Amino acid sequence: MPKPTIYGLMAEFSAPEQLLEAARRTQDAGYRRIDAFAPFPIEGLAEAVGFHRTRLPLVVLIAGIIGASLGFYLQYYAAAVSYPLNVGGRPLNSWPAFIPITFELTVLFAAFAAVFGMLAMNGLPMPYHPVFNVRRFALASRDRFFLCVKARDPMFDTEKTRRFLETLNARGVSEIEF
Amino acid sequence: MADSPADKFAEQSMEAPIIGPGYNYASVTDKISAIVLSRRPPKWWILGFAVAFALVMMLLVALTYLFAVGVGIWGIQTPVGWGFAIINFVWWIGIGHAGTLISAILLLLRQPWRTSINRFAEAMTLFAVSCAGLFPLIHMGRPWLAYWLFPYPDTMKMWPNFRSPLVWDAFAVSTYALVSFLFWFIGLLPDLATLRDRARNRAAKVLYGFLAMGWRGSAIHWARHETASLLLAGLATPLVLSVHTIVSLDFAYAIIPGWHATIFPPYFVAGAIYAGFAMVLTLSIPVRKLFGLEDFITMRHLDNMGKVMLATGLIVGYGYMMEAFTAFYSGNPYERFMIANRMRGPYAVVYWLLITCNIAAPQFLWFRKVRANVAALFSIAMVVNVGMWLERFVIVVTSLHRDFLPSSWGMYYPTRWDWATFIGTIGLFLALLFLFIRFLPLISIFEMRTLVASEEEKG
């Protein structure tokens, strides 16, 4: 397949329900490489463009476990191995006193994983993206809703796809240049 | 049926909406972003920022003198070794807690009214924590060695004492500051994109564009963003409770009468939320007026915040009562003396002032008329701000100044440098807030759009 000359087609809508409906119908029509853009999160929209589950919670869980283990081991190593200090015959591994810092480091690691994991999975920071070449796309952060069918989609055909998008009550359809 | 309490309640909530009528996606966006993108700041902003900035300069003078001469410029002296620095630390960090409560706990509890105040409250958290974090550093005899608090493989082959609440505090406060910042920043991300798209000025476009990281509002990005926000809220909720618990353990771990009490953690956490809501009210009342945001921060918000203040104020009142009761019931002569000395000793005025400010004043909040009166709410919030500072003064000073041995009793008098440092941090807090409301959207725009969408669905 030759490299497409455009990134895809962008249809503009004025209400969230219209976008949701359009995304579902595009998905039903067999398009697979689509994306939707909205100024706020819309329930069900990610599913409608074929996204099912994010693995973010798993990443956060793993980071939390790493934080907890490192936090506890740090204190255990310092207090019982590297610098054992006999305080009135009390146990060196005085684990209840190590819980607060273990907890804090669990939260710290998990929170970093949540934020940087979210950014990494979303591919951000990404200073340039073809969708920004559509002039009206600036309204995607205000009050307009956009549906994009990428040219990489096996079913994509500039003319046919444009006609299809126009049947979805779009306010307008424009080409996304690279 | 129409007269049942639930129906009445529903009716009242209908009367006071969480967003004024007639707003759509475009108008909420334009109204909030206009505050940031307008070319000239309003006159009151310039004036307010100038005053705050002058106070920051005073803080710098006080700190310079402190670093040159040492903590002897303060009023601390044996037996009161913890003066203003610790009072202010606890006061500031407590104020910060309301921001996390609003942004994390109310998000998990699905309270839509939090939307218009959470960004602002989170910023308040960050700035209050910045002021708080300053005090433990500067109250050390040798502040340039503050990094000794953290474990690192050093040539002394020493480690911090991980069994000490003071070390827990260093971890808790720095974790809290970092997590609050991250939470605030990912909430800002979509709004920074809005500002990038709406800015006309090239420099603003580049700056907001840089900070927005190329956010484009893709549905998949939103899904992950929402997951991340919820996870962070779930993490921040126990975190905020742990932070003030650990702060209270700084006291409760010691055997000083008046500090060594098991009630300290819950009583400190409630006090923190109490003080924080008072501060959110103190700040949001003038801001909504000055920017004309009465449709976004409505009477419903002020009413709810008044209710939270009343509830936490009652918990704090219970704390005071139990403190006195436990001291009496313990039969321990030192504990009994401590509470009698608080009520009748040389600092009795401060104690009774604190009771007036924190217990008596908020009782007016039982009345709906008071909660519906902006001036009254503002005054009560101010009184509570003062009262919570006095509470920390009483806890720190009255417990230390007369402990076990009468031969080592003494008095604590703050010096002008104590006051300059304290008022200087208020200036720092206000200066940061002024910069925030000028350069970043003080209400979460994307969450307001979500709110508009859900209002439209309701019809």
Image (cartoon, coloured by chain):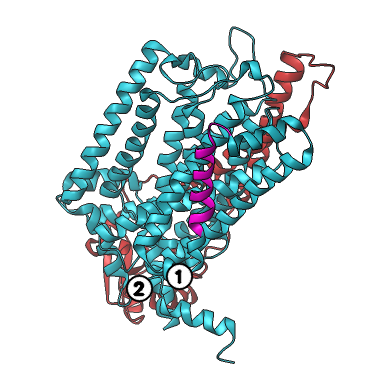
Chain colours: A red, B cyan
Residue B236 percent across, percent down from the top left: 56, 47
| Mark 2, secondary structure of its residue | helix
> For the residue carrying disc 1, how many other residues have a C-alpha within 10 Å: few (<14), some (14-19), or many (20+)?
some
Q: Is residue B360 magenta?
A: yes
Respond whether the residues carrying marks 1 and 2 are from the same subunit.
yes
Task: Please identify the quadrant where the C terminus of chain A is shown.
Answer: bottom left
Residue B263 percent across, percent down from the top left: 69, 43
Most extreme residue toward the front is B344
Left or right of B366? Residue B163 is: right
**Could one spot residue B381 in this view of the protein?**
yes
Residue B424 vs residue B174, the one in the foreground: B424
The numbered mark 1 sits on a residue in which chain? Answer: A
Residue marked by disc 2 = A161
Left or right of B297? Residue B408 is: right
Most extreme residue toward the top is B155
Residue B406 vs residue A99, the one in the foreground: B406
- Specify start and end residues of the magenta stretch as a single range: B345-362
Residue marked by disc 1 = A31
Residue B399 percent across, percent down from the top left: 61, 30
**Residue in the picture at 68% in, 43% down:** B324
- Examine the rendered structure and indicate whether residue A43 appears above or below residue B347: below
